[in-house]
Image (cartoon, helix red, strand yellow):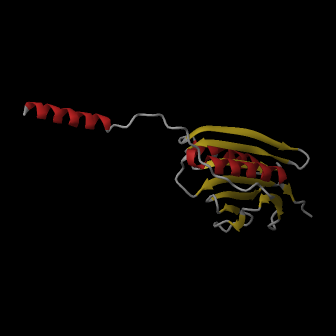
Amino acid sequence: MSRILGILSLLIFGFLVSCQDDVRPKPRAFLALNYPAANYHRVDIGCPYTFDINKIAEVQPSRNKIPCWIDLIYPEMEGTIFLTYRPVQNNLDSLLTDAQKLPLQHTIKADVIEGDIYTNDLHKTYGMFYEVEGNAASQAQFYLTDSTRHFITGSVYFNSIPNYDSIVPAAEYLRNDIRHLMESLRWKEEN
């Protein structure tokens, strides 16, 4: 009887030990989000500026109903580039200060905020482009001005809880669209 109990105990022990999974490292995985190649066209919405946008973006007036404030909506990415326009009326310093404070509001959640100066003397367009990395609400922001009459700010937001690892491909795609928007922006001459 003790011999049967010994064999039975050995079988149970062997069964329990053999049921464990071997621990193996898992390969790194990356999101495979593919977006179409950017295809730009000129947009004139009846404001003091024009620019090129990606054909996958939809242009809509801002929900704020302020003239020349628009939303560039990317339905496939659930992302939006919000553009605001203000005329410069002896208030360039305050407009610049406000625009430079906006990216700093994301420092709590951002891992890195990098600013690049943008200058286009030929088209009298000057500004900054801010790239935000981390779980911040906005992944990119910018402002452009001619320093005398016009001032535009823009911000990228996604319609989701900020999780940088999940939105990296979409954020990079929209950053490229912002860069193209900045490079293609032209001020309309007033008569």
Task: Spot the residue most to the left.
Answer: 1
Q: Is residue 69 above or below residue 143?
A: below
Q: Residue 58: name its quadrant.
A: bottom right
Rendering coords of residue 67 (x, y %): 73, 67
Q: Is residue 73 left or right of residue 187?
A: left
Q: Is residue 36 above or below residue 127?
A: below
Q: Is residue 164 left or right of residue 184?
A: left
Rendering coords of residue 132 (x, y %): 63, 43
Q: Is residue 46 left or right of residue 134?
A: right
Q: Residue 41: name its quadrant.
A: bottom right
Q: Is residue 23 above or below residue 150?
A: above
Residue in view at x 64 percent, y 63 percent: 75
Q: Quadrant of the N terminus?
A: top left
Residue in view at x 86 percent, y 57 percent: 187
Is residue 20 or residue 133 the one in the foreground? Answer: 20
Residue in view at x 8 percent, y 31 percent: 2
Q: How many marks?
A: 0
Q: Quadrant of the C terminus?
A: bottom right
